Image (cartoon, rainbow, N blue to C red):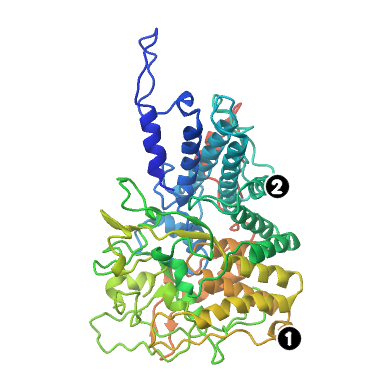
Amino acid sequence: MKKLIIFALVATVGLSTSCSDSFFDIQPQGAASLTSLSNKNGVNALLIGAYSLLDGVGAGNTGRQSTISNYVFGGITSGDAVKGTDAGDQPEQSFIEQFNWLADNTYFLGKWQHTYDGVARANEAILLAKSTDVKDMTDAERTQVVAEARFLRGHYHFEGKKMWNMIPYIDETIYKREDPNSTKIPNDKDIWPNIEADFKFAMENLPAVQTQKGRATKWAAMTYLAKTYIFQKKWAAAKTLLEDVYKNSGKKLVTNYHDNYRNTTNNNIESIFEVEFSVNDGSTGNNGNAGDNLNWPYSANAPGRGCCGFYLPSQNLVNSFKTSSDGLPLIGDKADGTADTYNMVDLPNDQGIRSSTIDFNLNKSIPVDPRLDWTVGRRGVQFLDWGVMPGFPWIRDQNYSGPYTGKKWMYYLADEGSSTHSTSKRAVNNNYRLLKMSSVILWLAECEAELGNLSGAETYVNIIRNRVKNGSVQDPTVTYIVNPYPVGTFVAKGKDYALNAVRMENRLEFAMEGHRFFDLVRWGIAAPYLNKYMAEEAKNGTDMSGRTYNKRGYLAGKSFTTGKNEYFPLPNDEILNSQKDGKPTLKQNNY
């Protein structure tokens, strides 16, 4: 879906002016009237406009405040990543990372604006599709537009729900174009039932396959509805839907894990719903993955060709990929992960070692999960087809943010030009896979564990682990060992161990994809998990070769507070803007 389409259409249909009896009655230039849009093409243009915000860019903010990757809200708050760059750059991200949250942080405002801009665009498409002024659409065509728009409306409300919990639900019956006060309603109701209803309607009215890539399908809606159930702990209801997707959607795991993170394998057999990124399509605006345009290595000899060093993997995340000699994660029997042993000693790294130190030896004999080097760039290891990562030159301030860089959104050197924007190598057409079969399988594992079927949970986790075991590796000189859990392990070790194993598998599979903070919150383990993470990440480190060094000292004394940090503050500006009859209709979260 190219956001250019809607803008071009709107500009085209609004370029003409009309005469009237009043000198001042002039139609605005570059804006489309409802009359000019009241046809099938106009309805589709509005629907594409609603799709175009899926990437998080185009709602009047910086894009990174609402990018689909959620790297600020779901990544740097989760223990998987640090803000990166240097201490003085983008301090509002630092405040979020350190749980120093204030309601005037513009990142919260940008995310809110994007959420409700997306909702508004979906509602506009629904209203026009239902309008009797549109004469050239069949009932079936109208229903499909409404179903796609309701899928999108469900998605945007879901994004807001997991951010702020209590938010207003705005549908086409509430929204009145002529009344700016119509959407000023209280956030005093749980909107999960409304989100469920949107996804149910979409599931029941969308085709199983769309002719155009990027449009929502029955299976995408079913999967999203199951995710909605999972966030509410409706395990049995979620399991029923997920089993349907798993058995009947025709989707399956790709052979190689990394094929979920390459532009040349966009829309593959594993993908259920992708946010489409486009480059070199004639657009002069933000496209590709523009919301993540700061999250690139600092060196001009690296992907992106320089700038800006944000969103870097934590040492804790890197350590989590360590495996035992039998190829299993180093986890304990507490469901909150606080008994895990992987973080006791760091994997060897080049923290504090300049690239001019030519005798650096990574020690590649320590066994790790292959997903580590498809997720993280680390010195001494092959980086896609760019050669061996050199370390320090790719990191803006290693003493502040650590020695690693993210990898999943990077492009291959061989694809530079065809996959990158002509004027920016940091805009890439590597789609964001929002829903995929691996998600379905691990949600099924979670449902089974929560429902007490530990052997079933183990089976699903092992499907994921076997894919990794049998798939490709990034660097054959590294010791990669990963194996499935021996049959009966979950039953023998009990439910807490099984839940922890499922949660660890989620981390390893989806690291740096922006989901983890929201998962920690819904699991109810955010406080013990994150407080342990910050206390350990702030200390001096010692790696497995015995070398000591400074880590993330700025996290010292920072903490996650139960009842306060599960949800973000509503933006102050939106509370002020919600005033009706002299009183705000929105109520602030505790923060």
Task: Identify the residue shown where x is 43% and y is 57%.
Answer: 93
Which residue position holds label 2?
A: 193
Q: CA distance from mark 2 to mark 1?
A: 38 Å
Residue 351: % across, % down: 35, 79
Residue 77 as seen in the image, left or right of residue 337 = left
From what the image shows, is residue 26 above or below residue 145?
A: above
From what the image shows, is residue 390 above or below residue 522?
A: below
Give the mark, 2 or 1, whose residue is nearer the N terminus.
Answer: 2
Q: Quadrant of residue 14?
A: top left
Res. 524 in view: no
Residue 263: % across, % down: 39, 63
Residue type for callout 1:
Ala
Badge 2: few (under 14), some or many (20 or more) residues near its Cα, within 10 Å?
few
Res. 41 in view: yes
Residue type for callout 2:
Pro
Q: Quadrant of residue 384?
A: bottom left
Task: Identify the residue shown where x is 51% and y is 47%.
Answer: 103
Task: Identify the residue shown where x is 64% and y is 37%.
Answer: 186
Residue 523: % across, % down: 65, 65
Element type at marker 1?
helix
Residue 104 as seen in the image, left or right of residue 491 = left
From what the image shows, is residue 159 above or below residue 348?
A: above
Q: Residue furthest top?
A: 21
Badge 1: few (under 14), some or many (20 or more) residues near its Cα, within 10 Å?
few
Task: Identify the residue shown where x is 54% and y is 92%.
Answer: 325
Q: Nearer the viewer, residue 581 or 544?
A: 544
Which residue position holds label 1?
A: 492
Q: Nearer the viewer, residue 581 or 223?
A: 223
From what the image shows, is residue 342 above or below residue 121?
A: below
Q: Quadrant of residue 487?
A: bottom right
Q: Are marks 2 and 1 in contact (CB under 8 Å)?
A: no
